[in-house]
């Protein structure tokens, strides 16, 4: 039996997870178009990572948070590879994902609690 969603943390997590899925779909669609034009695979892969991360978080799985953090680390590596240490070049590539990473970190206790509830439920 699936643990019932209750409380602000659980609902906020669900909303955030849906936002991640939607952002990921947009990023993956644009990334697929870019790949078709001969561009970088980054956007397609990052978008798919966000979609999967959001779906896992909707299922109260810690793996979703870890996957997002992995996508974030890959984003930083890609950004450094693309623009080097140019601060103004890094800002548009890293700040948005960093904000999402901070939110993911803030939701980790909620995910742990939800996972524990799920394990106890028969």
Image: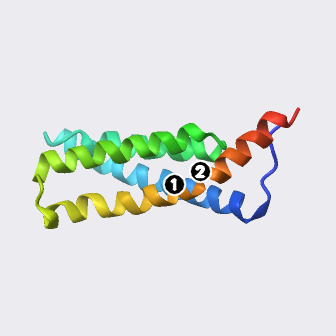
Mark 1 closeness class: few <14, some 14–19, many ≥20 residues within 10 Å: many
Where residue 14 appears, as percent x and y from the top left, is 64, 56
Q: Residue at x 15, y 67 (%)?
A: 88
Colouring method of the image: rainbow
Where residue 21 appears, as percent x and y from the top left, is 50, 51
Mark 2 closeness class: few <14, some 14–19, many ≥20 residues within 10 Å: some
Q: Residue at x 17, y 49 (%)?
A: 80
| Residue nearer the viewer, 20 or 84 | 84
Where residue 91 appears, as percent x and y from the top left, is 23, 65
How far apart are labels 2 and 1 at the CA level?
6 Å
Q: Is residue 48 left or right of residue 4?
A: left
**Can residue 33 be spotted in the picture?**
no
Q: Secondary structure at mark 2?
A: helix
| Residue nearer the viewer, 85 or 15 | 85
Q: Which residue is mark 1?
A: 104
Q: Residue at x 29, y 51 (%)?
A: 30
Q: Secondary structure at mark 1?
A: helix
Where residue 99 appears, as percent x and y from the top left, is 41, 63
Q: Is residue 87 left or right of residue 52?
A: left
**Can residue 92 be spotted in the picture?**
yes
Query: Quick one: quadrant of the C terminus?
Result: top right
Q: Is residue 117 left or right of residue 97?
A: right
Q: Are marks 2 and 1 in contact (CB under 8 Å)?
A: yes
Most extreme residue toward the right, as rendered?
122
Q: Which residue is mark 2?
A: 108
Q: Which mark is residue 34?
A: none
């Amino acid at each position: 039996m699936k643990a019932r969603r209750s409380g602000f943390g659980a609902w906020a997590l669900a909303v955030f997870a849906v936002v991640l899925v939607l952002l990921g779909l947009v990023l993956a669609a644009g990334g697929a178009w870019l790949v078709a034009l001969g561009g970088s695979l980054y956007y397609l892969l990052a978008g798919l990572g966000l979609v999967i991360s959001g779906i896992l978080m909707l299922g109260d799985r810690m793996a979703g948070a870890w996957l997002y953090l992995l996508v974030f680390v890959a984003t930083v590596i890609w950004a450094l590879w693309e623009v080097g240490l140019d601060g103004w070049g890094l800002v548009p590539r890293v700040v948005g994902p960093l904000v999402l990473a901070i939110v993911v970190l803030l939701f980790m206790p909620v995910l742990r609690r939800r996972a524990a509830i799920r394990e106890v439920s028969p």
